[in-house]
Image: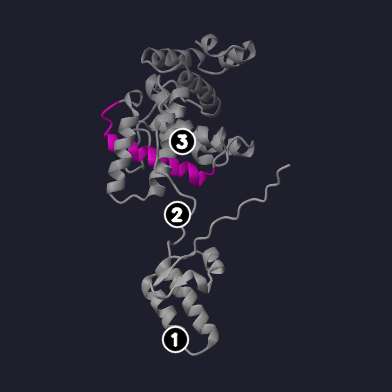
């Protein structure tokens, strides 16, 4: 099995010489028969090598506390080596793989009453979400807060699906319906755009890992975010009335400014149009303003 996953002889020998080589190969064969993709098996094999190196397996079995202690030590080493920005996701991946392997081999001792169980191991798609988080942390170098937001949006989508279909069965129409429903429930365009970005990243990762044969990431379209969307469209009309009333004096400056403000507020003139406005542009009898002027013709000289 190791020869199928790794092409370098030195890497194969490293896996062969590590503890529990036969048991690890048996575990990988079983996961291959379940339909796990090659990339997933490759990831499991690499993590299992870390697990058997850091975790001692006594004859009495392994408890969740022992797995957590080994995971803490391993995650701190990963962070010290600069392979992860935070120890959280490396720790979760270690616990997930170690627990899965120990249960398969019969080494795992269930928690005693009164202890806090590991909440992530039984959640649907927990392994895929942890793998996605570790990839964002170690490969892309995203900030911890960004990873948490991405995982939250992906979890919300999977929860909305109610796990009715597999990841490989997801289509762009499902994502469109999800974003549409969340929009009717009060999501802003910004939240919808962030959710679409997180789902695009997740389904690209799913295609790379072999969880899905079709990459739907490019077909996921979120709401359009405009550059100046956050800027206010204009002051409230009551504020405009208050501004105009404050200039109701006999001062020449206030008379001029009041006329400018009223032209902008009532007629919607731009600043450039105000600068070009002349008395001849006002039709006093017809109560009209005309600021259109023909463009000057270029001075062409003919030979």
As drawn, the label of residue 248 is: 1
Give the crowd class for mark 2: few <14, some 14-19, many >=20 residues within 10 Å.
Answer: few
Toward the bottom, the furthest residue is: 250
Q: Give the residue at x 47% y 74%.
A: 261
Q: Nearer the viewer, residue 26 or 79?
A: 79
Residue at mark 3: 92
Residue at mark 2: 229
Does the magenta portion include 155? Answer: yes
Number of numbered discs: 3
Which of disc 1 and disc 3 is earlier in sequence?
3
As drawn, the label of residue 282 is: none
**Spot occupied by residue 181 in the image (x, y as percentages of width and height):** 28, 43
Give the crowd class for mark 1: few <14, some 14-19, many >=20 residues within 10 Å.
Answer: few
Q: Nearer the viewer, residue 265 or 161?
A: 265
Magenta span covers which residues? 143-165
Q: CA distance from mark 3 to mark 1?
A: 69 Å
Query: In what element is the residue under mark 2?
Result: loop
């Amino acid at each position: 099995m190791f020869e199928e996953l790794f092409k370098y002889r030195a890497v194969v020998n490293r896996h062969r010489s590590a503890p529990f080589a036969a048991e690890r190969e048996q575990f990988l064969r079983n996961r291959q028969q379940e339909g796990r993709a090659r990339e997933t098996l490759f990831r499991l094999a690499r993590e299992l090598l870390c697990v058997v190196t850091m975790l001692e397996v006594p004859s009495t079995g392994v408890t969740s506390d022992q797995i957590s202690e080994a995971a803490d030590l391993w995650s701190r080493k990963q962070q010290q080596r600069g392979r992860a920005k935070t120890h959280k996701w490396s720790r979760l991946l270690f616990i997930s793989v170690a627990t899965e392997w120990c249960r398969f081999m019969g080494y795992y001792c269930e928690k005693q009453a009164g202890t806090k169980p590991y909440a992530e191991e039984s959640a649907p798609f927990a392994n895929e979400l942890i793998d996605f988080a570790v990839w964002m942390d170690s490969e892309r170098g995203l900030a911890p807060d960004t990873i948490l937001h991405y995982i939250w949006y992906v979890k919300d989508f999977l929860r909305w699906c109610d796990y009715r279909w597999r990841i490989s069965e997801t289509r762009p129409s499902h994502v469109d319906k999800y974003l549409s429903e969340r929009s009717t429930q009060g999501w802003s365009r910004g939240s919808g755009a962030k959710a679409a970005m997180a789902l695009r990243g997740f389904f690209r990762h799913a295609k790379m890992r072999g969880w899905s044969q079709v990459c739907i990431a490019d077909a996921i379209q979120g709401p359009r975010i405009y550059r100046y969307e956050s800027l206010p469209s204009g002051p409230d009309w009551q504020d405009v009335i208050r501004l105009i009333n404050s200039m109701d004096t006999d001062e020449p400056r206030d008379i001029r400014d009041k006329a400018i403000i009223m032209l902008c507020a009532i007629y919607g003139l731009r600043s450039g149009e105000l600068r070009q406005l002349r008395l001849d542009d006002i039709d006093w009898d017809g109560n009209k303003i005309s600021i259109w002027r023909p463009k000057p013709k270029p001075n062409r000289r003919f030979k």
